[in-house]
Structures are given as structure tokens and as C-alpha cells.
Amino acid sequence: MTYATIRLEVGDGVATLTLNRPDKLNSFTSEMHAELRDALAVIRADPSLRCLLVTGLGRGFCAGQDLSDRAVAPGSETPDLGQSLESNYNPLVRALRDLPMPVVCAVNGVAAGAGANLAFACDIVLAARSASFIQAFCKIGLVPDSGGTWILPRLVGTARAMALAMLGDKMSAEQAEAWGMIWKAVDDAALMDEATKLARHLATQPTKGLALIKKAIRDSATNTLDQQLDLERDLQREAGRTYDYQEGVAAFVAKRAPAFEGR
Ligand code: LHQ
């Protein structure tokens, strides 16, 4: 599949989505959103794909919304940014959250505005040591979107989330790791090798079980303990009916490596 603003490559059970507007630090346009929607639907429909890796081309990961077409001429009607979230950003975050496979993010450079929150919407985030995260919204009078106001307090607590959102300071990858916002910061030169290795490993694991783990951890954010215990019961029932559970137990008993099929 050929796209203009992203690249989709598949191999070894991994779909790699690369944001591809490097001269604009991979900022989002409507075209890019439409292509991402299409690519995510293609990935979801392909049973051979068992992990998604998201990254950016060039020196930036993603600088959020492309602001070049957002300047409002004096006297003209103000744009409806809510519609932009409804049509583009919210479906993207939901598609990543609901994708029944692990989503790895390799943050290769600056991640600003919706670009930062795109990374935080992924399941396991690696970042190059030179990468940075900026909740840039406040600098142009906006509110963190793409799930930012939901995920930030859950990742770092209200005090830090509030300051990050109100100050829009640049945060280093190492600080993000120290605050538990990402899985880890790695040397720049090692980022893609590590991310690809991780994605390929995940693609050999019990995909259905990993998708259920993803659901359980995500849903825990809004569940009571009682609701979560019920959810664990239901998801474990489902996991226990998978081929990979049988294979995992059989391999353990036979003292051999399991050959998971993702079903
Ligand atoms: C850009 C952008 C960009 C266009 C760099 N747009 N060109 C949702 C709903 C609807 C509307 C509004 O927004 C949202 C969600 C959002 O994401 S709001 C937040 C939007 N993003 C920002 O406010 C970040 C703007 N960018 C920056 O602050 C800086 O570019 C950062 C800190 C990301 C990087 O700084 P530098 O490393 O110094 O690079 P640079 O500023 O020189 O940028 C390189 C080029 O990329 C430059 O183009 P040029 O032609 O001059 O080389 C920038 O204009 C372009 N670029 N971000 N968002």
C-alpha cells in the first residue's frame, strides 16, 4: 500500500507505520489522518500482523497539528477545532487503544502537542535519548488533546500533569523515563534496532492474550476493584480458551519452547 504522508511496511508479523513529513517534523494534516485511518484498518484486518510499531522519519517524531493551515484571518469565521478532534484525533487514539495487538512507539525526536499524546496512546514507548516531549497546546491557547488530559494525570499524577500542561516546557526522554511516562530512553543509534527487536519479539507472543492484557490495564483506569476483578474473570476465561494458552502449558510441561500462533 502506498501513501503520501506515511509509510506502512510489514514483515516478521510486525506492521511498521512511519510518519513521513520530515520537513514539517511529521506534523498532522487531514491527509495524514485519513491515511493513518486507512492503514490502521488494513493492519487490523490482517491476521498475520501481531504487533504495530509507530515511528517518525527524520529528526522529529511528530510536531502535532500542522499549524501552517490554521492561521485565522482577522474577521473570518473561527475554525471548529472540536470537529477536527471528532473527525481525526479521537478516532486515531481510539484505533490505537482498540487495536488487538501490542503497539510499540519509537520516539525518534521531538514529540509536541498531539504528537506527544500520540506516543502516550501507544502501549510500550521507547524514545531516543535526544528526543523530547512538549505539551505545546498552552502556548497557542489550546487544551491538551488526543487523550492528554486523561493520560497525563494517570502517568504522573495531577501536580506534574498540571504543570506540564500549563507550562508546555520541553521534557527530555530521560526525564520522561524517570517519571514513568515511557518504558525507556535508549541511545539514539540503538533506537530502531531495539524497537524492532522488541516488536518482533512481541509478534511471536500470544497475541490474543496480550490484547486482553492491554484491555485489562486500560480499563483499570476507570474501574473499581470489584469491576476489575469481574473483568479479570471474564478476560481470563477468554484467554483460557485460546490455542496459545494450550500451547504455552504443553510447551512448559514438555520443557520445550512454545510456538505461539496468536490465536
Ligand atoms: C511545523 C510544525 C507544526 C507546521 C514544526 N506545523 N509546521 C488539534 C486540533 C486542531 C488544531 C490544533 O491542534 C491540535 C493539536 C495540536 O497538536 S496543537 C499543538 C501544535 N503543535 C505545536 O504547537 C508545536 C509547534 N512546533 C514547535 O513548537 C517546534 O517546531 C518544535 C518545538 C516542535 C521543534 O522546534 P525546532 O526543533 O526548533 O524546529 P523548527 O521549529 O525549526 O521546525 C522545523 C520545521 O518544521 C519548520 O519549518 P521550516 O519550513 O521553517 O523549516 C517548522 O515551521 C515546521 N514545523 N512544527 N506543528
Image: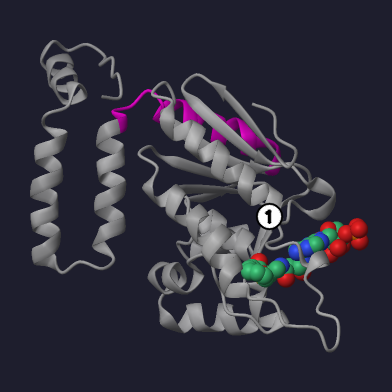
Amino acid type, mark 1: Ser
Q: Quadrant of ligand 1?
A: bottom right
Expressed as whole percent of the image width and height from the top left, the position of residue 134 reads: 65, 68
Expressed as whole percent of the image width and height from the top left, the position of residue 53 reads: 54, 37
Q: Number of numbered discs present?
A: 1
Q: Magenta stretch containing residue 193, yes or no?
A: yes
Q: Magenta stretch containing residue 226, yes or no?
A: no
**Residue drawn at the location 56% of the way across and 39% of the way down:** 38
**Residue drawn at the location 68% of the way across and 55% of the way down:** 30
**Residue 33 vertical placement versus 242 (above, below):** below
Expressed as whole percent of the image width and height from the top left, the position of residue 188 reads: 69, 43
Q: Nearer the viewer, residue 34 or 245?
A: 34
* Main SS of residues in magenta: helix
Dot 1: what SS? helix
Please identify the quarter of the rendering in which residue 175 is found: bottom right
Q: In the rendered image, which residue does mark 1 sit on?
A: 30
Q: Is residue 61 left or right of residue 263?
A: right
Q: Nearer the viewer, residue 155 or 38?
A: 38
How is the model colour-coded? one colour
Q: Quadrant of the N terminus?
A: top right
Q: Is residue 108 left or right of residue 102?
A: right
Q: Residue furthest bottom?
A: 75
**Residue 198 vertical placement versus 90 (above, below):** above
Residue 128 visible in this rendered orientation of the protein: no
Residue 22 visible in this rendered orientation of the protein: yes
**Residue 128 vertical placement versus 15 (above, below):** below
**Residue 189 vertical placement versus 218 (above, below):** above
Please identify the quarter of the rendering in which residue 139 is found: bottom right
Expressed as whole percent of the image width and height from the top left, the position of residue 108 reads: 68, 47
From which residue to which does the magenta span run?
A: 188-207
